[in-house]
Image: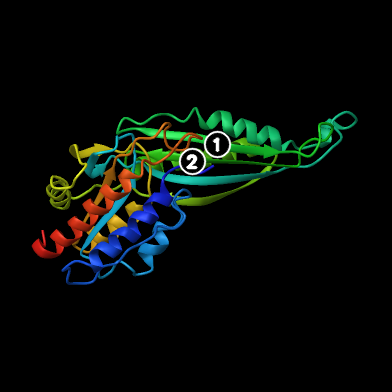
Amino acid sequence: MHACGHDAHATIGLGVLDAVIDSDFEGTFKVFFQPSEEQVAGGKAVAEGGHLDDVDYLLALHVGLDHPTGEVVCGVDGFLAVSHFRAEFTGAPAHAGAKPEEGKNANLAAATATQNLYGISRHSDGATRVNVGLMGGGTATNIVAEEAFIEGEVRGATTELMEYVEGRAHTVIESAAVMHDCEVEINVEGKAPSARSDDALAAVVGGVSEGVEGVASILDSDELGGSEDATYLMQRVQDRGGLAAYVGVGTDHPGGHHTRTFDVDEETIRIAVDVLAGSVERIAAERP
């Protein structure tokens, strides 16, 4: 199950491309179909690949985000920096009945790490998060587990807060392995920093949205409360003197993101195309 709206995002991207081609736009226009967003593993590669080095203005988009159809958020903020990890524990097998003392239980190390990760101290500088979403190990009920794994994530309201939790998490995982006489290997599977939308670019989106049919409510900004590796793209453009904004276009759906009942109101697609294409044309004309 994925259920987040990225099929709609791809459709919107193609719609915006067609609209810009049919307009009076002059300049260079690029459309990025963000790879591996759910694993926060594609944005950094795109940014470091130089694809954005000649980009002066960047608009990123997501549908939904707990906003209804007809509502536009011109500049989403409140991105939580995130790091995804996988820890693989290796112990030694033994017969759980005859010789349990000869085993080194990787399941115990993984379970200890999981429990203690949730005990990482909060931070006075802002919000932090930790979660273990996957775990597994062992081969049979009568064998002390030789191998086990956990996969999880840490987040922070700023990149520095995320790195604080990440450092503590690695210490917890390594200590759990030592406690049960096991080895552990920790791999970072994906990572993304925090970011902020530029007010000047968000203002353009707001101005365009006022004239788009079906837009009933316009918010200057809102807190995302989640993570997104489009922040790498935003930072790349901003670090080179450009402007970036992350736009939210609401959609009515029976369930929240990442639930089995998630769906996209197709009217959202038209609204998003009109908002983004109109914004691209105005940005080219006005150069905010």
Viewer-proximal residue, 38 or 264?
264
Residue 29 in picture, x, y percent from top left:
25, 68
Viewer-proximal residue, 81 or 287?
287
Residue under label 1, please give it. Answer: 133
The numbered mark, 2 or 1, whose residue comes first in the sequence reads 1
Residue 256 in picture, x, y percent from top left:
42, 33
Viewer-proximal residue, 267 or 173?
267
Gap in angstroms between the C-alphas marked 2 and 1:
8 Å
| Image-quadrant location for residue 79 | top left
Residue under label 2, please give it. Answer: 153
* Number of numbered discs visible in the structure rendering: 2
Q: What residue type is labelled 2?
A: Glu
Whether pointer 2 and pointer 1 mark residues with C-beta atoms closer than 8 Å, the reply is yes
Which quadrant would the N terminus be assigned to in this image?
A: top right
Residue most toward the right? Answer: 98
Residue 44 in picture, x, y percent from top left:
40, 59
Position of 111 with respect to 283 (left or right) is: right
